[in-house]
Amino acid sequence: MGKIISFSNQKGGVGKTTTCVNMAAYLSRAGKKVLLIDLDPQGNATTGLGFSKGALKKSVYNVIIEDEDVKDNVLETELEGLYILPSNIDLAGAEVSLVYKKNRDRVLRAALEKVKGQYDFILIDSPPSLGLLTINALAAADSAIIPIQSEYYALEGLSQLMNTISLVKQVLNKSLKVEGVVLTMYDGRSLISKQIAAEIKKYFSKKLYEIVIPRNVRLSEAPSHGKPIVLHDPKCMGARAYAALTEEFLKKTEGKGE
């Protein structure tokens, strides 16, 4: 059975989508069959993998609102073994539509049960909010990866996210856990970055990945080309960091026999 991981942080601009897209890409390069679900109405993971969300008629909206099968809405990407259930403009209204659905907080979970065994990993790029879409992602997931920016406001709102994860675990998904925490946009020359990293390590202990993601121009420009960093510039500092992070993730995950 595939492992479902939600990439979550209600604070925007922390490298959540960048981390989700690039880990998905490197997992596929490692020979894993991966499905990336773009559950963010902004659709950045979709465009970051080369698709125009405005031109897509099929998307995750069709799955969670219109009850279509996941397999009928999945697209192949440039990378062998990497597939995407994309976002399109319809998803902007999904939060309102979900309110009227039965079991509205477990719609995605039910849909993924049918395809979970077909993938090694299913990665969900959640919205930067704590609404019904994010609740659906956490209710469907085995675990959550939390990207945190290494800047002053990094821990702001983090307790709210942890409370939400705890609540989802109590009410909807008893097996949900924090898979790990990724420090992003790290500047090793900055004293504040080092101080924030120390605080986050104190807060999360062993959950913090050793590999940190640096600030990197090539990494930030890759989405505008519709490519993950492994296809845009595989030798840059950002690419090497995501390759190493994915390797660390696999060692921890496979070491647990999952």
Image: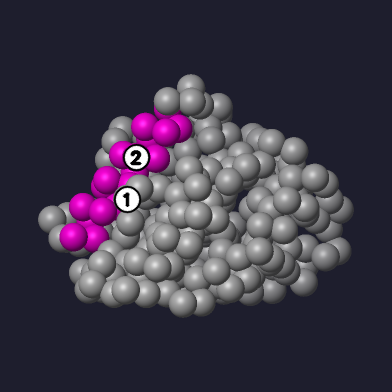
Q: Secondary structure at mark 1?
A: loop
**Residue 121 as seen in the image, left or right of residue 185:** right
Along the line of sight, which residue is nearer the eye, 246 or 60?
246
As drawn, the label of residue 248 is 2
As drawn, the label of residue 223 is none
Estimate the x, y position of residue 6 in percent, counting from the top left: 56, 51
Q: Secondary structure at mark 2?
A: helix
Q: Residue at x 38, y 35 (%)?
A: 250
Q: Residue at x 29, y 74 (%)?
A: 190
Q: Is residue 39 above or below residue 3?
A: below
Q: CA distance from mark 2 to mark 1?
A: 8 Å
Quarter of the image with the N terminus in it:
top right
Q: Which residues are magenta?
A: 237-254
List the residue tagged with mark 1: 211
Estimate the x, y position of residue 176 in percent, counting from the top left: 66, 41
218 falls in the magenta region: no
Q: Quadrant of residue 100?
A: bottom right
Q: Residue furthest top?
A: 257
Q: Residue at x 73, y 63 (%)?
A: 132
- What amino acid is labelled 1 in the image? Ile
248 falls in the magenta region: yes
Q: Earlier in the sequence, mark 2 or mark 1?
A: 1
Along the line of sight, which residue is nearer the eye, 177 or 36?
177
Residue 102 visible to the viewer: yes
- What amino acid is labelled 2 in the image? Glu
